[in-house]
Image (cartoon, rainbow, N blue to C red):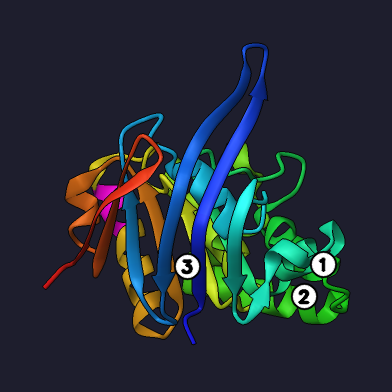
Amino acid sequence: MALIDARSIVKTFASNGGDLPILHGITIAIEKGEFVAIVGQSGSGKTTLMNILGCLDIATSGTYVFDGIDTTTQSLSELARIRNKKIGFVFQQFNLLPDLTALDNVMLPQLYANISTREARARAVELLGRMDLASRMHHYPNQLSGGQQQRVSIARALVNKPMMILADEPTGNLDSQTGSAVFELFQQLNAMGTTIIIVTHDRELAQKTNRVISLRDGVVISDVVNR
């Protein structure tokens, strides 16, 4: 069974001029352990698709089964539980809470999952150490470089041991050297068995993944396995 089985996904948004269609019947399947890039120009629908795959939004029509669960039949609270337990998110803007230290930012998803503070702290310290941030864990986001903030966000994404990481333009705000280092982290995580999906407009970056799904105007125009 595929980790992701999305069939005939349609997404429309209400606007003053009527319904605005974004996705037009997308069907994709992604297996556990894949490293996939979803690419397309602005307006192609890639972020909308990512939000549905990450259970941040639901399709207008179609079915989306994630890890054997039909997400279209789940309540909002159940979708939140799936996100917390099974999916890690990494964003272009980092999305760290500015009033929390790096350590506290990484601990937070565990506290939402009712993990004890002691266990949450130990796991966060371990992950920040793996990200070469042991000496920076008590710093606030505005005291960290862009690359350091992104590594904190990756640690936060990993802290609940998700099956899948969704990364939306994860190197978009980084210089090329730092971006390469962050991408290498994703490659290492994928080698350890984590499913990685990167949403990007950077086709050069996408070619370093194992598979590239290209969108245009809300439809899949190609789905290519990289050799």
Look at label 1 and name its amino acid. Answer: Glu
Whether residue 111 is visible, yes or no, is yes
Give the mark nearest the N terminus, 3 or 2.
Answer: 2
Identify the image quadrant of residue 80.
bottom right
User: Magenta stretch: residue 179 in it?
Assistant: yes
Look at label 2 and name its amino acid. Answer: Ala
Whether residue 151 is visible, yes or no, is no
Mark 1: which secondary structure? helix
Identify the image quadrant of residue 54.
bottom right
How far from the left and from the top, in percent, is residue 77? 86, 61
Q: Which residue is mark 1?
A: 78
User: Magenta stretch: residue 48 in it?
Assistant: no
Q: Nearer the viewer, mark 2 or mark 1?
A: 1
How far from the left and from the top, in percent, is residue 67? 59, 80
223 displayed left or right of 61: left
Look at label 3 and name its amino acid. Answer: Met
178 displayed left or right of 78: left
Camera-side residue of 25 and 169: 25
Q: Which residue is mark 3?
A: 131
Segment tinted magenta in the rendering: 177-181
How far from the left and from the top, in percent, is residue 192? 40, 85
